[in-house]
Image (tube, coloured by chain):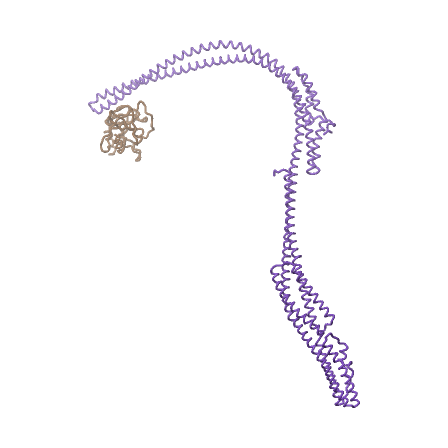
Amino acid sequence: MNLKLSTKLIGSFLIVAAITLVVGVIGWNGSVKLNENVDDIGNKQFPTVQALLTLQQNLEAYRVAQRTMLNPELNDNDRKRQIDNFANARNGYQEAMEKYEKIQHSDEMNRIWQQFVSAFDDWSRENGRFENNLKKLDETGIYNPDRLLASIEQFIGEHHRLEGQIASLIINRNQFEGGEDHTSCNYGKWLSSFSTNNRLINSAISNSKEAHAQFHQSVRAIKQLVNANNIAAAELELRTMHKHAEVVFGGFNTIKEQAAAASRLNSEMSIIAMDDVREKQDVALSHLRRLVEISNNIANDEISASVASANFVAVLTIIATIIGTLLAVVFGIFLSTSISKALNRIIAGLNQGSEQVASASNQVSGSSQQMAEGANEQASSLEEVSSSLEEMSSMVKQNADNAGQADSLMGETKTRVEKGDSAIAKVNKAIGEIKNSSDHTAKIVKTIDEIAFQTNLLALNAAVEAARAGDAGKGFAVVAEEVRNLAQRSAEAAKNTAALIEESQKNAEQGVEVSNDAAEAVKSISESAMKVAGLISEIAAASKEQAQGIEQINTAVSQMDKVTQGNAANAEESASASEELSAQARELKDMVNELVKIVGGSSSENGSSSGYYKQDMDNNKKNGFINVAKKSFSKKIETNGKSTISPVSPGKNGKNDALVPSKVIPLDDDELSQF
Amino acid sequence: MSESAEKLKNMASLAGKYLTFRLAEEEYGLEILKVQEIIGLMNVTRVPKTPSFIRGVINLRGKVIPVIDLRVKFEFDIKEDTDKTCIIVVQVNNDNNHSVVMGIIVDEVSEVLDIKGNQIEPSPSFGASVDTEFILGMGKTAQKVVMLLDIDRVLSGDEINMVGKTE
C-alpha cells in the first residue's frame, strides 16, 4: 500500500471509530426497543393486570361479605363490619374500574370489557336486590328467625303443657312442681335477655308481658286453691288463666309471624346470594379472567419479545465488539508493523548508507594518497622522458640526412627501370606477330584437312557406286581406292603440319607469357622504386615532423608537470572533502540512532555503529597523513616548476605504502569531540 | 554337323564388299549394296514424340529421310559429334519387302572392304536371352574383327514401319 502515513493512521482510526459507532448504535437501538417494551409492560399491561386483579379481589370480597351476611349466627358487630366490607369492596372495584378505563386497550380487550361491564351491571342489580332484602331484614330486626321460631315454639309448648298440668291438677289433683313464677319460666328468662328494634314484636311482647305474669300468677293461685281444696275457686281462676294464656299465645303468634317473615327474607337473600349473584358474578369474573389472561399474554409476549430482542442486541453487541476489537487490533498491528517495518527498512538503509559513505570517504582518502604517490612517480618519469627526448632528437637528424641520399639514388634507378620496360614491350609485340601468323597457317591446314575429308567421302561414294555397278565398275573402284589413298595421305600431311603449327603457336604463347612476366616484373620494380622514393621522402618529412613533435613533447612534459602539481592539490582537496563526508556520515548515523530510539526504543545497534567511526577516528589520530602529503607535494611542485625533476626518494615512498586508506582524515581529539 | 555346314555355306554366301565404319571404337560392316551414299553431318531436324534413337529428319536433295543415332540404338554412351561424324544413307527392307531409305549416324566411315567367305565366322551365341540376330557374322581382317550388320534387322519391323511413316 502506497498510502501516506497520515492517511493510513487517520483511515485506521476512522475505521475503529466507525466500528465503535456501529456498536453504540446497535446497543442504543436495542435499549430503545427494550425501553419501549418495558414501558408498555410497566405503564399499560402491569397496571391493567393490577386493576383487573384488584377488581376481581373486590368482587370476591363483596361476595364473601355477602355470604358472611347470610350467616344467621352473626352478631351485630360482625354485621356492621360486613356492611363496611360491602362499602369498601364497592369503592375498591369502582376505583379499579376507573383505573382500568383510563388505560388504552386493544379492541378485543375493549370488547370483552364491554361484556364484563354488562355482566357487572347485572351483578350489581342482583346486589341491589340483596341489599334491599337486607334492609328489610334490618327492619324486622330478626337475624336468626329459625332460632326465634324454635324458642317461641318451645315457649308455646311449655305454656300449653303448664295448662295441661293445671287442668290435670284441678281434675285429678295431680301435683306438679314449678310454673308459679313468670320470671323463672323459659319465656320469662328469654324476655329478660331479649331485645329488638322490631316494633310489632316489641308491642306484642309488651301487650303479652302482663298477661304472662298474670298467667303464672293464676297458676300459683290455682295451686294454692287446689291445695286448699277450693276447686271452684280454682276453676274460676282457671278461666282467668285461660284468658291470659290467649293473650300470651297471641303475642307468641305475632312473634312467630315476624320470625316467619324474616325467615322468608333470609331464604330469599340466600337464593339471591347463592344463585343469582353468583351466576352473574361468575359471568363477570370469567370476563375478568379472560381480560387478565389476555393482558398477561400480551405482557408475556412483550416480555419474551423484549428478552429476545435484548438477547439479540446482546449477541449483536458482543459480535460487533469482538469484530471491532479484532479489527482494531489487526489494524493496530498492521499499522504499527507496516510503519515500523518501513521505518526499520529506512533506518537499515540509512545505516548502510552512512556506513557506505564512511567507507567511501575512506576510499577517497586512500585514492588521494595514491594520487599523491602517482604524482611523485610521474615527476620522476617525466625527467627520464626529457633525457630520452634529447637522444631522439639527434637520431632523427641523422635519419633525415640518410633519407636525402637514398632519395637521389632512387631517381637513377627509376630511369633505368623505364628503359628495361620499353625493351620488353618491343619483344612482346614481336612474339604477338609470330602467333598471329601461325594462327593463320593453322586455319589453312584445317581447310586442307576438310578438303581431304570430303575427298575421302567422295572416294567412298565412288567405291559404293562402283560396287553397285558390279564387274563394270571394277576399274572405277580401283581409281576410287587410289583417290581415297591420296585423300588419306593429304589428310595425314595436314595433320602433321597442324601439329607442328600448334607447337609453334604454343611456343609463341609461352614467349608472350614470359615477356609479359618480365614486363610485369620490371613494372613492379619501377613501382617499388617509386614507392621506396616516396617512402624515403616521407621518412625525411617524418623526421622533420618528429623533430617538431619532440619540441611539442617537451612543452607537453612541462604541462604535465603543472598537471601533476594540480593533482597534488586536488588530492589534498579530496582528502579534506572525505573528512567532511566522514563527519556528515557520523551526523547521519546520530540521526538514524535517534530515529531508531523513536521507532524501537533503545537500540542495540547503537554501540556497534558508532564503533566503526571510533575506529576511523582512532586511526586518523595516529597519523596526520594529509599534512605530511601536503608538505611533500608542495616541495615537489616548487622543484618541478623548472622542468628539472628531482628524483623522489624511494625511502619516502616505501613509508607511504604502509598507510591504510582510513588513516587519511586528520582529526585530533578536539576536532573529534565536536562531532 | 549339318547345321554348322549349312552355316558355313551361309557364311560363304556372305562374302563380298562391305562399307566399314567406326562406332564407339569398334568396326562394323554394312553390305555395300544396302548403302545408297555417304554424306557429311548436316542439320538434323528433331521430330517430336519419336523414340530417342531417332535423331530426326534431314533434307537429302529435296527428299526428307529419317536419321537414326546408332549409338543410342546400340545403347552406347552418347558422344558429341565430331568433324568425322558421317551419315550413311541406307535402303532398308521392312517385313512387307517395302524398301525404306534412312540415314544412320556413325562416328567415322573407314573404307570399302572386300571380305572373303573364309574370313567370315558366325556370330557367337551368348545364350537364348541375348539377341544377336542383327549380326550377320564376324569378318576377320589382318589385325581386326569387323561385325557385319544385318541393317534390316538392326531396326525391328515396327521400328522400320514407324520410321517409314516419318517419311
Asked whether B110 or A42 is in front, the reply is A42
Q: Could one spot residue A302 in this view of the protein?
A: yes
State whether residue A284 is above or below residue B84. Answer: below
Left or right relative to A170: residue A320: left
Asked whether A144 or A635 is in front, the reply is A144
- Colour that chain A carries in the picture: purple
- Colour that chain B carries in the picture: brown
Q: Could one spot residue B142 in this view of the protein?
A: no
Q: Position of residue B88 (x, y in %)?
A: 27, 26
State whether residue A79 is above or below residue A337. Answer: below
Left or right relative to A217: residue A450: left
Quadrant of the frame with the C terminus of chain A: top right
Q: Quadrant of residue A522?
A: top left
Left or right relative to B131: residue A472: left
Asked whether A507 or A432 is in front, the reply is A432
Quadrant of the frame with the N terminus of chain A: top right
Q: Position of residue A48 (x, y in %)?
A: 65, 60
Q: Quadrant of residue B143?
A: top left
Asked whether A551 or A82 is in front, the reply is A82
Q: Quadrant of residue A512?
A: top left
**Residue found at the very far left of the displayed protein:** A472
State whether residue B135 is above or below residue A233. Answer: above
Q: Residue at x 74, y 88 (%)?
A: A168
Q: Position of residue A376 (x, y in %)?
A: 66, 20
State whether residue A166 is above or below residue A573. Answer: below
